[in-house]
Amino acid sequence: MDFISKLQKMIDECDKIVFFGGAGVSTESGLKDFRSKDGLYNMKYKYPPEEILSHSFFVSHTDAFYKFYKDKLNALDILPNSCHKYLTKLEKCGKLKSIITQNIDGLHQKAGSKNVIELHGTIYENYCIKCGKSYDAGYVFNCEGIPMCDCGGVVKPKVVLYEEALDDMVVEEAIYQIKNADLLIIGGTSLTVYPASSFVRYFKGKYLVIINNDKTSYDGMADLVIHDKIGDVFEKLKI
């Protein structure tokens, strides 16, 4: 039995499916990932992207932060791909209980998915660090320079930067969904970003599947490992 047939059989058999995804889910829509040879971390900037996307850099070099953020993380015109669309169909038929994503691009919601847990926040929510007023993504990406609030405060994306902690309630919900899944599909992630990668250890269900171009440190734990583009895999699956 080939890999696709095995995965299809698992999906058909299970009714409490959870999908845990990373940057590789979005790259096929045209967004850059971080750690691949063509990713953001291997591009040359005045400052390393890891430093630019840190809380301390946001505070001390806000203008440079926003130049990078607007140039590299703007997903407003990006469209969902076959992976996002398949997961939406799987949710609508009641089999997929949750999507846990490390991405901040909102593509799962664009595709129509409802139960999406965003571990690292979203570009679509922004707030003034002085008064708390909310601003949409269009305001942030389309303004000149640093987005400022009416009160004079700096507007910050509701994105978890380096040096910032994940939201406790978001973490609890993600762990709950993983604990209660009978099939956990991990896709498009190297599983190297802590603490998100550690959540996999809470899975006690029937099948663990990993779909990623490259090997991960969790491959040995999985019931099925597929080294391929995630979009190509999901295009071959049926509901």
Image (cartoon, grey):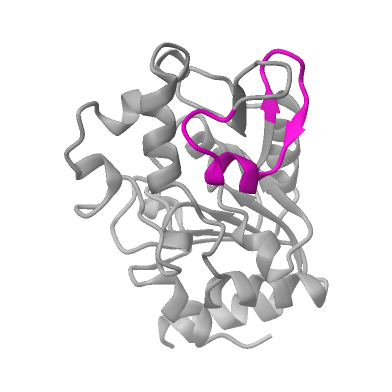
Measured as percent of width and height from the top left, residue 190 is found at 37, 48
Measured as percent of width and height from the top left, residue 76 is found at 56, 57
14 magenta-colored: no
Task: Give the left or right position of residue 134, taking residue 220 as reference.
Answer: right
| Residue at 54%, 78% in the rendered image | 82
Task: Give the left or right position of residue 47, taking residue 152 as reference.
Answer: left
Measured as percent of width and height from the top left, residue 157 is found at 60, 32
Which residue is more in the foreground, 35 or 138? 138
Measured as percent of width and height from the top left, residue 185 is found at 56, 61
Which residue is more in the foreground, 88 or 192? 88
Which residue is more in the foreground, 33 or 194? 33
135 magenta-colored: yes
Is residue 174 among the parts visible in the rendering? yes
Residue 96 higher or lower than 62, as above or below: below
Q: Which residues are magenta?
A: 127-147
| Residue at 60%, 82% in the rendered image | 9
The answer to which image quadrant residue 154 occupies is top right
